[in-house]
Image: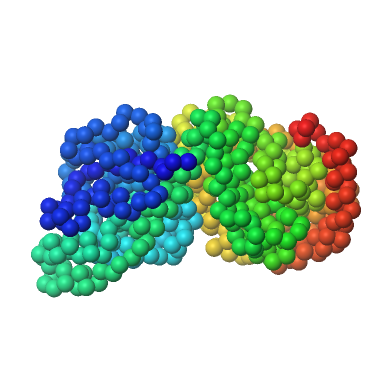
Amino acid sequence: MALPRLLFLTAGQTYDEIVGTHGDFDAWFATGFKGVAELRTCRVHKGEAPPPTFDGLDGVVISGSPSSVTQFEPFMEVLCDVVRRCAEVDMPLLGVCFGHQIMGHALGGRVEQNPAGREIGTVEVVLTRAGATDPVLGPLVPSFRAQATHVDSVVQPPPGAEVLARTAQENCAAMRVGRNLYGVQFHPEMGAALLRRYISMRARLIDQERGPGAADKVYAAVTETRTGEAIMRRFVSEVVVPHQRAAHQQRGRPARKTRTRQRTVDHYTESYARADDGVEIFYNEVGRRSPTIMMMDGLGCDQYVWKHLVEQLRPDHHVIRWNYGGHGRSPPPTGWDDGHCHRLTLEGLADDAVRVLDDAGVEFAVLFGHSMGVQAALETWRRHPTRVAALVLICGSYGRPLRTFHGNALAEAALPYVQRALNKSPRISRGVWRRLLDTELAYQFAVNVEVNGDLVKRQDFRPYFTHLARVDPRLFMKLLGNVNAHSAEPFLADVDVPTLVVAGERDTFTPAHLSGRMHHAIPGAELLVIPAGSHTAPLEIPELLSLRVEKFLKERVLSEGAAATARLRASRANGHGTPAEA
């Protein structure tokens, strides 16, 4: 695949004295993106018009500027239009300094002079909780140094924006809107020598604002950092390239397989499998010993609940985790919002699971399901029985979970009304969804009402809200409706693989009595009830669950491994299974 093509929109130019030694804005960014992306420059501040469509482009970058959003000029409306077009189609966008501010303004935020005054020099950038899990900035946790020089700030981020980082003077040092729109207030394209030139040229202003000798102190404190270049390159690899790949797939071109490295050691690796609709499914692997364990998330989850269990299992097992379509790093399925979407059904999730196993070169696996993942694991067994060696079903229902949510069917009755409200105003609903979920209030409500707040740790549970806020609420509700229409009850008695059912004693989402019914319905199934455990029991008392799972794997899977392997292979040879496997 060719290098991604980025449309570079200039919003101004640097001092003539600097151009001679360092070049202008386009030269700085070209250096940062060298080898990973190609830039096509459009000098918007000089009246050049951006292309009317994004055809042939994979992303947009907006530069800094000596101009101010607070003193609006005609060319700025052109940039605002590009930003809004990017938001409509989720086109990757990186706005830097002024570009960050114009992005905030265009999408409904507020830009003013920073109440804390001019920020200039090498600054310490501290990630927020959202930033710590962000694919671009996350690896830099908890903080990093960057070059900065600005007076204006995004004092109120636009609706739906997630603040990813802050500095001592800047409450919104980085933000993300949607999946692909990024703004950073600092200058990732600047090096130390370039920033020192800016400080020298603005020394008089700095001294006037901060007192005599202030500029010399700021100048002396400037340090070189390669973090900016790393951020620019990660923006390409984590945002632009996946978007480029998805666009190629939609046009019917073959996608490039993106396994980061072969699974030859126990280290963490990342890969993408291709679903039936051509869209990629993100998954990661750790460990390499048999048996393989595949973990299947709950609705709206991004692997958070498996944290402790993976650490316990990785030394002795090969563990695969993956993201459902529209979750985590897996793009939404093709046409999900147009009507029926197979991949947003339990049958589709089962087929996606097998696609991942195929891509990882795994013949069959022990399926661990949590919450909705219990139904997904059971459906995978039903559709693809020769690929399932055993089942571990944790804090989930065998079907129609809204009928038993909090002991009544009120949630099931309300679902159609919620879906209609979300479909009526998709953009507003996304903004409200994000604002409500990724908040301290939502977290406090959950730990005081829904889960055992005395047992679950903030650092384990808080990422759930950060991720859920990024899931499209319409996609979430569509999948929830399909989950609630599904039931594995008719075939529980036919399940013929070793099964461990795990329940939380105080689970209000999927009450423990449902796990008891599964235990009795599945022949030979074992049951573990975690005392005082809620729906997040794997995070609340991880030691108990880990020990019980290890015992189950040792006694029921490893000791029966040879027989299970023979049974599965014989079953496949005899054509056992459903037409979905044929």
Please tell me whether residue 116 is drawn above or below residue 349 in the rendered image. Answer: below
192 on left or right of 260: left
Q: Position of residue 145 (x, y in %)?
A: 34, 65
Q: Position of residue 77 (x, y in %)?
A: 24, 35
Q: Position of residue 417 (x, y in %)?
A: 57, 31
Q: Nearer the viewer, residue 530 or 127?
A: 127
Q: Nearer the viewer, residue 342 or 287?
A: 287
How many marks overall? 0
Q: Position of residue 128 (x, y in %)?
A: 43, 59
Q: Residue at x 28, y 33 (%)?
A: 50
174 on left or right of 466: left
Q: Tell me which corner region of the image, top left, top right, bottom left or bottom right, holds residue 104.
A: top left
- Do we see residue 372 in this rendering? no
Q: Tell me which corner region of the image, top left, top right, bottom left or bottom right, holds residue 385.
A: top right
Q: Nearer the viewer, residue 58 or 264?
A: 264
- Do we see residue 491 in this rendering? yes
Q: Residue at x 22, y 62 (%)?
A: 195
227 on left or right of 538: left
Q: In which quadrant of the rendered image does the C terminus lie? A: top right
Q: Residue at x 61, y 65 (%)?
A: 454
Instruction: Spot the residue most to the top.
Output: 339
Q: How is the image coloured?
A: rainbow
Q: Residue at x 72, y 38 (%)?
A: 400
Please tell me whether residue 531 is drawn above or below residue 563 in the rendered image. Answer: below
